Amino acid sequence: MVEELRTTVGIVGAGPAGLMLAHLLHTAGIDSVVVDNRDRDTIAHTHRAGILEQGSVELLTRTGAVSRAHTEGHQHEGTVFRVDGVDHRIDFQGLVGASVWLYPQNEVFVDLAKTRDADGGAVFYGVSDTQPGGFDTDRPTIDFTDADGTARRIICDWIVGADGSRSVCRTTVPETTRQRYAHQYPFAWFGILCEAPPSAPELIYARSERGFALVSQRSDTVQRMYFQCSPDEDPDDWSEDRIWSELQARVDGPDGYRLTTGTIFDKTVLPFRSYVTEPMRHGRLLLAGDAAHTVPPTGAKGLNLALQDVRVLFEALRDAVTRGDESGIDGYSDRALARVWKAQNFSSWMTSLLHLDPQASDFEFRRRQGELRGLLESAHGRAYLAEAYTGWPGESTLTI
Ligand SMILES: Cc1cc2nc3c(=O)[nH]c(=O)nc-3n(C[C@H](O)[C@H](O)[C@H](O)COP(=O)(O)OP(=O)(O)OC[C@H]3O[C@@H](n4cnc5c(N)ncnc54)[C@H](O)[C@@H]3O)c2cc1C
């Protein structure tokens, strides 16, 4: 026996893309049902993105989706590029009049989930066997088993695949009808979470002869740091002492800067890749966020791109559902991809600029040093970086 649910938009994935879309649809009086195969507590405790572009914070707060970004998050008016132990500050406010906000993705989730609760939104966490289908019909479906073991079917007008980089929605589309663009990097990030006060008021992107490191924050008592490593590095081979001495070596400099150390309670190796699937629409299936594209985390673009997709997609769905105007749906893929490819370029460029490629020639190593120096010595170069990092103006005309 299968329990049937009827809704306008069926959404696979309760990450930032899926929940934010459900929230925006609700504000326009459009109902949706969201399913996610992780339980709520697991999502709330998964540490991923930390940096929100100014436009993302405005979207999340002005629509009432997120309540604590301004009170519990931290505004960063700039960032530091530390090259061979010497700081070069990129003054976002001075260069482009914008900021980013440090407000962790798991807190964004907690706020979004509470907002869905308060609005009576239907979200099924901890589901299994998700199977979307019928994209080429006018009644697509999402089959799943809920957390209590009940087999259910969502019957809807549109399916949104917001189910992250291993998207089942994307892989359900025949490979012959989609184009895949991918790039693999010869390095990864060794990421740690530690109990310590912040080592710096803003993010520090460090490049040294030992490779890249990122000094980042989470809260007043928990910090996030990364250093470049080999993709096959085993976290268990790294003791706390070894991790701290490697991180310190990558930020050492004549100013005597020292990291504030503390107990490490999480260590992970994060492989890098750039990936885009085109188009982002297949009949009545629309892909959004990491389900359609992933970027290396260096430029802090993934979550922000997911929110930008949703902004464009919301307008398209609203016009289709409330006015029968599907021109926005027809144009969704091209509009979203315009920003996706700008962000792909920025993320890939920033990654190559700051990491040491183990396969690069001596010429390439020196050329990169020259590129970085040229960028940091040029006000125009720093302004390009500041504009891209804080976020370009949106493709959406959505008024918030
Ligand atoms: C270490 C790290 C650091 C990062 N730092 C930044 C940063 O500073 N700034 C930034 O903008 N981005 C950053 N990102 C990227 C960011 O985390 C992602 O781009 C973002 O999570 C994308 O959101 P999403 O909603 O598209 O996908 P996700 O957050 O991946 O959500 C997808 C959801 O779908 C669910 N799902 C998957 N398969 C199924 C299924 N079969 N059935 C039902 N549900 C399913 C998953 O459980 C998940 O909850 C970082 C990523 C990592 C890994």
Image (cartoon, grey):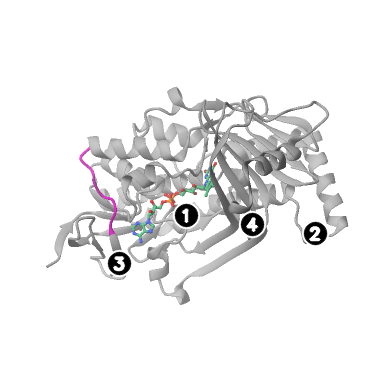
Q: Earlier in the sequence, mark 4 or mark 3?
A: 3
Q: CA distance from mark 3 to mark 1?
A: 18 Å
Rendered image quadrant of residue 223:
top right
User: Picture coordinates of residue 161 (x, y %)?
Assistant: 37, 58
**Which image quarter: residue 19?**
top left
Tag of residue 131: 3
Q: Label for residue 360?
A: 2
Amino acid identity at mark 2: Ala
| Comparing labels 2 and 1, the label whose residue is closer to the camera | 2
The residue lying at 32 percent from left, 45 percent from top is 40
Identify the element where label 4 is drawn.
loop
Q: Earlier in the sequence, mark 3 or mark 2?
A: 3
> Which quadrant is home to the C terminus?
top left
What kind of element bears circle 3?
Answer: strand
Q: CA distance from mark 4 to mark 3?
A: 35 Å
Q: At numbered mark 1, what does the secondary structure look like: helix, strand or loop?
A: helix
Q: Residues within 10 Å of mark 3 (few under 14, many from 20)?
A: some
Within 10 Å of the Cα at label 2, are there few (<14), some (14-19), or many (20+) other Cα atoms?
Answer: few
In the depicted view, which residue is nearer to us: 28 or 362? 362
Task: Please check the rendered image and state whether residue 126 is part of the magenta-colored stretch, yes or no.
Answer: yes
Q: Name the residue that disc number 1 marks.
A: 290
Q: Position of residue 186 (x, y in %)?
A: 68, 60
- Name the foreground residue: 184 vs 237: 237
> Disc 3 or 1, which lies upstream in sequence?
3
* Residue named by callout 4: 233
* Residue 400 appears in the figure: no
Compared to residue 93, the image places residue 51 above or below, namely: below
Is disc 1's CB within 8 Å of ligand 1?
yes
Tell me which segment is drawn in magenta.
Answer: 119-127
x, y percentage for residue 243?
66, 43
